[in-house]
Every structure is written in C-alpha cells, then in structure tokens.
Image (tube, coloured by chain):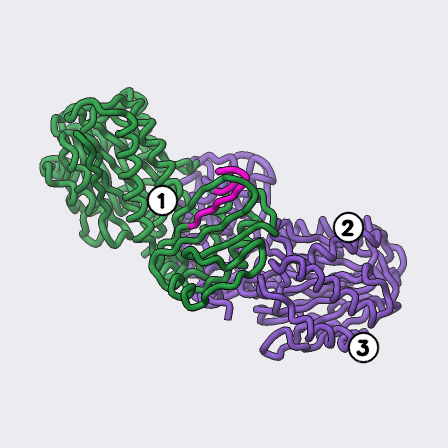
Chain colours: A green, B purple
C-alpha cells in the first residue's frame, strides 16, 4: 500500500527524539538489495532552500541519477541553518550509508518541520543506525507514519499496472505545511527504467498533481519528491510508467488537499475558455489563493462577485461581459451578470465537502485547474504559533 | 478636516435606502461655485471593472480633466451589472448634474458594496436630488460617514501648507474591502493647478500610499481615487502640491490599515538591501500577503523562518546566507541563521499594535515597503458570508 508495495524495497520508521512529543520522526526507505538503482527528484523552486534539498540534489548529480536509500526526519526542517545544516544533512547520509553499506552519495535526505533550528544530531547519530536495522518489506506504513508533522493521517498510495506497480508516501498539509514547513513524497516502482525516464515521468506527474495543489499559496523551503526504481519487474512501456507515476502523484496530492490544515472543504477551481492554458492556471491560482474566496467557501456562500474580481485581476485575458461562473454545475453568473438559479440546490452544493467551481472566461480554449481548500478559524488557530 | 477643508468645496451625506440598515449611503462633493474645475483620477487595474469606474474615466477624458462634482453611493458596488449598470452609473451623474445645474459629463461617480446586484435606482432617483440640496462647507464629515461599508470609523484627512491645503475622505477596510468591494477616496485642494499637474501629483501620491497598502492581496473592481482643485487659493509650487497630496494619501492609507477587517495589528514590512527597489517591493508584498506570516503576527509569534521562506520564493534576487530579519529593531535572523536576542524585549515588541518588520536581503541597495495587517479569527468571521 506504500513505498514497499513495489518489489525490491524495504522501509521502516522509528521515534528517535527529534520530536519532543515522542512521536515517530525518522524514516528510511532503501532497496532490498542494498545496491543503488535509478532515481530522480523534483525539488522546491524556493531560493531559500533547505540543506537536505541541496544535499539530495548534489548526490543525484554526482551519482548519475542513482540511489540506494532515502533517510527522512520530521519535526525539524534543517532549513536556514547555514553551513552547519549542510554538514548535518551530509552526516545523516553518512550514517545511513554506514548502516546500509552503500556510499553516502547514494543516499538522499529529506527533513520537514520548523525552520531555523539546528538538528539535534545526537538523536540522529543513534537513531539512523537503529532505524536502518529495522527495515522490512512491510515497513512502508511505519515510514509513512514517521514523516507526519501537522498531518492528521498518513498518506500512502499504490498504483498497480500490468507487470509493475508504483507506490508512494507523502507528508504535507499545505504546499508549505504551515507550522512545520514542507511537503515531501517518496515514490518507488519495481519497473526497470533509466534515471532520464524516471525524471521525465516524475516531472510530468508532479506538474499535474502537487504543482496544481495550493492550500495557501506558500512554497516551502524543503519540498521534495523522489522516485526510485528497483528494476525487479523488468522494463516497461515508458508511457505506462508515466501514467502510473502521474496517478500515484495525483492520489497523494488529493490526500494532502483532504488533510489541509483546518480545512472543511476540498475545492477544485477549474478555469475554461481562457486565451491559453497558462492564463487558465493563472486565473485558477488567483481565485484559489484568495483569502476572500476561501472564506466564502468556508461560509458556504456562493458569492461569485469575488471570483469574477479575482479572475479579472489575475493577469489573464479577460472580458467582463463574457465571464460565467458555476458551482457544482449550477451557473450563478452568466456573461458577467447574475444568473437565475435554483437557490435550494445551490445551497446543497455549497454544503458538501467537495466543491467544484468552474470559471468560463469565454475568450478561448485554454483550460487549467488548481486544487485547494477553504480558510477557516482552525487554520488561524494552527498558525498563530509554532509551539 | 475633510473634503470641505480646502476653500471652494461643499459636501453632504444622507441615507437614501441603498443600505437596508438605514445607515447613510449617499454622498455628494461639489465645487461651491457649481462650476467645473481641474480634476484627476486613478482607477483600479482590475479587468473586472465596475460601471462607475468606466463612467468616471470616460467623463474625465471627455471633459478634458474637469469636474464640478462627485456622487458616491455605498452598499452596492454596481459591479458585474452589465449594460444596465453602465446606464445606472450615467443616470446617477445626470441626476446630480440636474440638481447642481452642471453638465453630466462634469460629474464623477463612485459606488462601493456588494458585487453583482442591480442598483436600487428608485432610491437614487429620489436620493440624489435630495442630497444635492443639502450641501454645505461643513458637510465633509457627513459625506465621509455616508461612504462607509465595513469601515468601523470614517476616514478623513486635512494637510495644511503655506497658502493652500489638501483635504480628503476615504472608505476601505482592505484593498478589496471584503464584504463590500472597494476602496474609494476623494481629495480636494484649493490650490490652482492644471489637470496634468493634479494627475502627476495624484499618481505619485497613490504610488507611495494606497498602492503599498495590502491587507489581503485582493484588487477591487471599484477602486477609485479622485482629486479636485478649486483654484481659490491661487497657483502654488507643484512640488509643494505633490508633497501635500502624498501626505494626504498616506494619512488616509494609514487609517485604512488601522481599520482593516478583523485586524489586531498594523504591520509595516520593509525590505532593504535588495538588488532593486522593484525586488524589494516584490519581496515585501510576498511576505505581507502570506497567510502564514499574517497568522504568526496575530499570535505574536516572531517565527522568522516563514518570512525568509516567503522572501526566497518572491522572485527577488536572494542569497540565503545573507538575509537578516528584525522585528522592531531586534534582529532574530542574521546571515540566514538564528540570531541571539533578548527574548523578553522581543515578546514586548510582538505584543504591540504597530509592528515593523525589516528584511535585509544583503545583496544590493534596493528598498521598498508594504503596509499590511494580521489575519485573525475576526477576518474569517467577516468574510464567511455576505449577509
């Protein structure tokens, strides 16, 4: 059901004391053979880049796109920690490599949690070797558990295809999961593929899943999505692999949207009739990131004026006499003005947990969507403090 | 103290029934002479543009930058109302022109309130002539009162200079004042100036005041700032006029920031050491519009990791080993890592109503600022519904 679903991988998760709560906070995913396999990664575009992102990117480059293991810690992001943070991330890889008898450059590293605080390396010096001795083919769930921060549930996926599968785990309750920076995902497959094939599949899969998820418009310092291929199942059709990776990414992204901090709703903002696909995504993102629209959804208020206003200020080509808006298929604005509709049916749509909003800009054939959430009292509660 | 502070202007405000509450909802500002004078306007950049904005812009163009009066209604934005809305905005000007015996093209019009609902023209057909008969040189306060929507207080300013003055009124509890779209401001001066001089002074004044105010990152369909010059005080130095207009705009913008919906704090986000002034403003805006940073301020939490993360993803040139962050002069992050500081003194700073955050990017000499607020439970309450 998780990263150990595809053949050729082992995993595990333990509590080593990074989190004061005593909850699980350290995960390892590794190849069952102990040998390095094809791997690819997609990382945050934030110029404030956490140490583990810099180290993982460098390791993938120096190893020619091969990795034997991923070590992940939660509770501390190892971001804004300077040269000491870089040394700590490298040390995490060395500790894992020592226990797993591979090269340190074949280990990738992820951390997630508070920014600006040195990692408690004494805990990790003991924890990583201990975790590495407890890996198994059933350990995917424990690993997924150990990367949670403000997530209320662990997030796992397994996509089966003819002759191979793609599995994955993720954490994240926002693009920047508020109290505890970041989203992370590790995907595995038993397909045999080159690093370049994996990179292509992963980039495309991320574009249509994590990159259209925006709970609060914030880009984390630590965002990382990794894909390792054991090759145990042999070569597969690259198109099939791409489709399975995309499906796995989409499954994890939807679980993240459903668990966004304080949210009561998962909202799909779909824009059609745009001058281009880029325009459609820009307009959808503007609506999805609007505090005003988000509050409306929380209040189950179908006030479309804010949606039109946000679309009009998104930079997308816009003709206010052609824009239409619907909630759950019920048109509330047509050609820029209020449309007659069944108020009772609309109220029912607005009350549901999953809401689809369609904005038809009426100026072309471009389409795009953003998956988002409402803005609630509970979101404010979760983000008022870091304690 | 308001638009009737400068010589040569009269104003008034009444309740005519646009607002169901019975609160004042109609204001008129006019020249005491009844004749058109030099005027200038700055309008929303939103492509979803309300009818009164389109009409005021057209009237200023056709009259060559001259106006005799401004008529303003609150409670209904006359936005997303199509051709009927345009006719209604024109009709408001005709009604004012008839009562004041000037040309309709010499009247400017503003509306503010809910989007997508036709104006109740029957109320305005009676209300505008009635209001126009009750104008006086002491009526500025009543006019300022009548343009309020979610504003908890009326907003007025008067800047005295040697031989002339600039007065003004404004409404707005956000760039898009949430429940009730828009910010509006009307400024007056008794200086004698050409429309071009007024336009230059107003554009510069708006750039350093309303345009650096961002309570929620939303741009309204109705934003309008107007400036009329009676000329009664005779010609003045253009530089002096520009400085007085800028001071008046800044005074109104600060009052709006202080009255932002649900806010407990006014926060100045100042970015220095940027590669350019544009970079500085982009980084400041990103931090100011971040839901995560806004929640931190509400919780009086000096968590600078979010600030660094937002600056890093703003698009501004950024070196994470050079960035520093201070709150109220207390440095909490230096060269990208945590800085030792007096925790008690910092907690006191975070508890104050006015907070100054300085981000030094350390890469150049560019500077800029954004004036903003925190994100609170009360903001969510105010924007959950439109009723």
Q: Residue at x 66, y 73 (%)?
A: B25
In this picture, residue A17 sits left or right of residue A331: left
- Residue under label 1, please give it: A116
**Element under label 1?**
loop
- Whether discs 1 and 3 lie on one chain: the answer is no
Label 2 lies in what chain?
A: B
Is B346 placed left or right of A259 in the picture? right
| On-image quarter of the C terminus of chain A | bottom left
How would you rate the neighbour count of disc 3 (Cα within 10 Å): few for under 14, some for 14-19, many for 20 or more?
Answer: few
Q: Badge 2 is on which residue? A: B199
Q: Give x and y (percent) for residue B171.
A: 64, 65
The residues tagged by marks 2 and 1 sit, at their Cα atoms, a distance apart of 47 Å
The part of the chain drawn in magenta is: A269-280
Is A270 covered by the magenta stretch? yes
Residue A264 horizontal/vertical position (percent): 34, 60
Q: Is residue B203 left or right of residue A286?
A: right
Q: Nearer the viewer, mark 2 or mark 1?
A: 2
Q: Residue at x 26, y 34 (%)?
A: A244
């Amino acid at each position: 059901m998780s990263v150990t679903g595809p053949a050729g991988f082992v995993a595990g998760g333990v509590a080593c004391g990074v989190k004061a709560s005593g909850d699980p906070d350290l995960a390892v995913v590794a190849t069952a053979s102990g040998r390095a396999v094809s791997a690819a990664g997609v990382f945050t575009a934030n110029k404030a880049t956490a140490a583990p992102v810099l180290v993982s990117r460098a390791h993938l480059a120096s190893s020619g796109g091969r990795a034997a293991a991923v070590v992940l810690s939660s509770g501390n992001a190892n971001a804004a920690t300077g040269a000491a943070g870089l040394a700590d991330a490298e040390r995490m890889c060395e500790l894992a490599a020592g226990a797993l008898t591979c090269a340190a450059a074949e280990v990738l590293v992820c951390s997630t949690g508070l920014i600006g605080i040195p990692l408690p390396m004494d805990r990790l010096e003991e924890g990583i070797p201990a975790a590495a001795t407890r890996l198994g083919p059933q350990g995917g769930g424990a690993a997924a558990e150990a990367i949670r921060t403000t997530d209320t549930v662990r997030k796992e996926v397994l996509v089966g295809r003819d002759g191979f599968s793609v599995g994955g785990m993720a954490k994240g309750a926002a693009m920047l999961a508020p109290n505890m920076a970041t989203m992370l995902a590790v995907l595995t497959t038993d397909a045999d593929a080159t690093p370049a094939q994996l990179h292509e599949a992963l980039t495309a899969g991320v574009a249509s899943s994590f990159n259209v998820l925006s709970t609060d418009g914030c880009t984390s310092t630590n965002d990382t999505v990794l894909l390792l291929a054991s090759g145990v199942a042999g070569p597969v059709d690259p198109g099939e692999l791409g489709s399975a990776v995309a499906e796995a990414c989409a499954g994890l992204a939807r679980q993240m949207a459903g668990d966004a901090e304080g949210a009561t709703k998962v909202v799909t903002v779909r824009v059609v009739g745009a001058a281009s696909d880029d325009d459609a995504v820009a307009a959808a993102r503007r609506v999805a990131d609007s505090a005003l629209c988000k509050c409306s959804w929380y209040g189950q208020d179908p006030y479309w004026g804010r949606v039109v206003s946000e679309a009009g200020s998104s930079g997308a080509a816009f003709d206010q006499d052609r824009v239409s808006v619907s909630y759950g298929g019920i048109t509330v604005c047509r050609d820029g003005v209020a449309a007659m509709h069944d108020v009772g049916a609309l109220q029912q749509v607005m009350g549901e947990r999953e809401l689809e909003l369609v904005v038809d800009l009426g100026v072309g054939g471009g389409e795009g969507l953003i998956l988002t959430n409402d803005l609630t009292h509970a979101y404010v509660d979760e983000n008022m403090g870091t304690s």
